[in-house]
Amino acid sequence: MTTVTEPRNPRTTAPRPKRRKRAAAAVATMRPHWTVYAVLAVFLVASVFPFYWSFLIASGDRFTINDPNMSWWPGGNFLENAATVIGNPAVNFWKALWNSIVVSTTTGVTTVVLSTLAGYAFAKLRFKGSNALLIGVIATMAVPVQLGIVPLYILMQEFGWTGSVGAVILPALVTAFGVFWMTQYISQSLPTELIEAARVDGCSMIRTFWHVGLPAARPAAAMLFLFTFVTQWNNFMWPYIVLDPQNPTLPVSLSILQANYFVDYSLVLAGVLLATVPLLLLFMFAGKQLVSGIMAGAVKG
């Protein structure tokens, strides 16, 4: 007795893993169209142009900004203008730079730590009133900062902190945006099963947060630190109110360059570029770690 063998369908018998590998290899070898590079080039030029224009004015003299025939090539006065800004006793550049570094770094670290702790509690812990507390925290974001200036100044005066950088650091130790940001990220990126597994293995609540919650929140924590650092570095209003002229932050000290009757914009923009250099260095050193953290948080399975 003979058996009849049905013909195989080549479409169904082809090995799927090989097809997937070929498809993945094809996607990996695909190159973007030239229009993608053109759009990216336009965005790059639009982003770099303000810095280049500032450098043009900062490398000239006080008449460069009003010159209708201004050259688009940098002049040779940038180092001289930068030295004038740094050596100006009214600006007190190095003191202001140190104060800005202390304020921005301290508030960045404390905001990340406290916001991550609060976000972990709101996202993964169950306690009475958690939703109401989170709504209350978010509601504070709707209150304008200007409304709290007077009572906050009175409070700092009662503490005897007016004129010191502590009066700038204390109100910015944690932000409502940071708590909301970390809550949303942890609730979406950290599976509850990992926390339960850690608790079953005998980890305490703090150890669970340290070994499970914190690594999962690292990409969002890096973004929050950079955002807080840049915000506090550029903060002008509150430091201008609460600090003394002898103990300023960098934006407050550079504002002295515009206090004269005739404003020398070459000096002003030279000071602005000097104040921007630390931010550029921060992004250069932290950029790779930030991208790697985001990619690590995006990998699942």
Image (cartoon, rainbow, N blue to C red):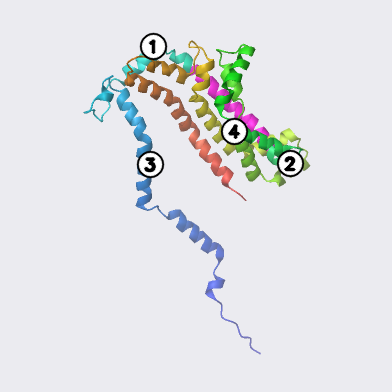
Taking the spot 71% from the left edge, 37% from the top edge, the residue there is 132
Mark 3 vs mark 4, foreground winner is 4
Mark 3 and mark 2 in contact? Answer it, CB < 8 Å: no
What kind of residue is marked 4?
Met
Q: Secondary structure at mark 1?
A: loop
Label whose residue precedes the other's in the sequence (4 or 2):
4
In the picture, the quarter occupied by the N terminus is bottom right
Q: Position of residue 36 (x, y in %)?
A: 38, 49
Rendered position, 9 above or below 241 = below
Label whose residue precedes the other's in the sequence (1 or 3):
3
Label whose residue precedes the other's in the sequence (4 or 1):
1
**Mark 3 neighbour class, 10 Å CA radius: few under 14, some 14 to 19, many 20 or more:** few
Q: Which mark is residue 159?
A: none
Q: What residue would you read off at disc 2?
A: 198
Label whose residue precedes the other's in the sequence (3 or 4):
3
Mark 4 vs mark 2, foreground winner is 4
Q: Is residue 5 left or right of residue 285?
A: right
Q: What's the magenta region? A: 97-121
Q: Secondary structure at mark 3?
A: helix
Residue 211 visible somewhere in the drawing? no
Q: Which mark is residue 88?
A: 1
Q: Secondary structure at mark 2?
A: helix
Measure how far apart labels 4 and 1 are at the Cα level. Answer: 39 Å
Mark 3 and mark 4 in contact? Answer it, CB < 8 Å: no
Q: What residue would you read off at disc 3?
A: 43
Give the image quarter of residue 78: top left
Q: Position of residue 68 (x, y in %)?
A: 22, 28
Q: Is residue 186 magenta?
A: no
Taking the spot 36% from the left edge, 35% from the top edge, the residue there is 48
